[in-house]
Image: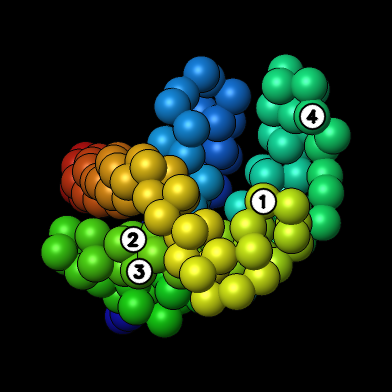
Amino acid sequence: MEEKRPSFQPLAITLTVVAAVLRLIPHPPNFAPVGSVALFGGARLRGWQAFVVPVLAMLITDPILSRMAGFPAYSWTSLVIYSCFMINVALGRAFLRRSSNPGRIAAVALAGSLQFYLITNFFVWLGDASLYARTASGLIDCYIAALPFLGRTVLGDLFYSAALFGAYALLSRHAVRGNGRTAAA
């Protein structure tokens, strides 16, 4: 008789939501769990949930953060930012679905940080000619000015990826052991 594997979807959804809510706790700029939430969601959530849960978490927390900071909740850049997080979901689905290897998780988290930096800053350069000249030199200036944010994004993505994937591995392993003891009793 084939043994049914336990489903850890409720655990994965819970960890994703908890990490997204952590955005509301004061933190250095760009040291946030959102990139990792998208990466983790892509790796551990099934089907549509992998895309919807991280975006829903953003849609709920963005207005709260914006109100706290005194900015409008959504702007034209929101679409770019959300698209970058969907790329993180795709990275998680493509490279981490069947992996718990810390080196691989770190490498994919780094790739997610880099794509976010490159894409969002390209649109910053493209979208506001008063900040940077629309030349190759202006684009380079934009990327250089954003380097401190890249550093914090990388650190945040590595930290929160380690926390999410580590907590998931630990808690799911504990649940399997707990189920084994219950079944044997």
Q: CA distance from mark 2 to mark 3?
A: 5 Å
Say which residue appears at 39% left-offset and 65% top-offset: 114
Pick whichever of labels 4 and 3 is earlier in the sequence: 4
- Determine contact: label 2, label 3, CB under 8 Å: yes
Q: Position of residue 56 (x, y in %)?
A: 72, 49
Q: Which residue is mark 2?
A: 109
The 10 Å Cα crowd at callout 4, few under 14, some 14 to 19, many 20 or more, is few
1 vs 3, front mark? 1
Q: CA distance from mark 1 to mark 3?
A: 27 Å
Q: Is residue 110 above or below residue 136?
A: above
* Nearest the eye: 21 or 132: 132
Residue 111 is tagged as 3
Left or right: where does residue 115 sit relative to residue 83?
left
Q: The residue under label 4 is which amino acid type?
A: Phe
- Determine contact: label 4, label 3, CB under 8 Å: no
1 vs 2, front mark? 1
Q: CA distance from mark 4 to mark 3?
A: 29 Å
Q: CA distance from mark 1 to mark 2?
A: 29 Å
Q: Position of residue 173 (x, y in %)?
A: 22, 49
Residue 71 is tagged as 4
